[in-house]
Image: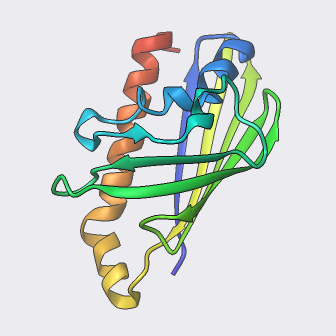
Amino acid sequence: MVHTIEAYQKIPTTIDKAWEFMSSPKNLKIICPDYMDFTITSKESEIQSMFPGQIITYTLKPLLKIPISWCTEITHVKDKEYFVDEQRFGPYALWHHKHFLKPIENGVEMYDLVHYKLPMGILGKLANQVFVKKQLQAIFDYRYKKIESLFGTY
């Protein structure tokens, strides 16, 4: 079963500043909770802005401090509008994350749409109900608060 998570946020900044921050791989660590110990391991992450075909590898500890490796590819980028990352290997059977930014009055609206599927059939479905969906929502909630602390409240 494919699951969906959506997140919206209005940010009191310009599209240029929002795009510069959100499209820079080095900022992924900033918007992830500290307990995840998110570490980018790929050298391309030092590049200022994402590009189609870019591979980003990292390690994180989302559960019980057990490290996992994750590899995503930036598959689509439209400057100052959207980018898409897709898992190439990692904890999910499917991970497809679309990030959209659009100028609005007095700021920028950010919208995320994630489609994901867990491996292991019925066990994956149970894991999603018990903790995965809640954990993903908590990560987006953390990001929301972190963005507010960096850019202000809309």
Asked if residue 28 lies left or right of residue 101, the reply is: left
Above/below status of 38 relative to 65: above
How did the renderer colour the structure? rainbow
Residue at point 70%, 27% (across, down) = 49
Tell me, yes or no, if residue 27 can be seen here: yes
Find residue 54 and report its horizontal and vertical position in percent.
70, 45
In the image, 67 versus 81, the foreground residue is 67
Asked if residue 39 lies left or right of residue 18, the reply is: left
Find residue 152 and report its horizontal and vertical position in percent.
47, 10
In the image, 49 versus 5, the foreground residue is 49
Residue, far front: 43
Asked if residue 51 lies left or right of residue 137, the reply is: right
Find residue 93 and report its horizontal and vertical position in percent.
51, 75
Residue at point 66%, 53% (across, down) = 73
Specify the quadrant of the image occupied by residue 15: top right
In the image, 70 versus 44, the foreground residue is 44
Tell me, yes or no, if residue 105 can be seen here: no
Residue at point 51%, 48% (across, down) = 57
Asked if residue 68 lies left or right of residue 153, the reply is: left
Residue at point 70%, 11% (across, down) = 14
Specify the quadrant of the image occupied by residue 43: top right
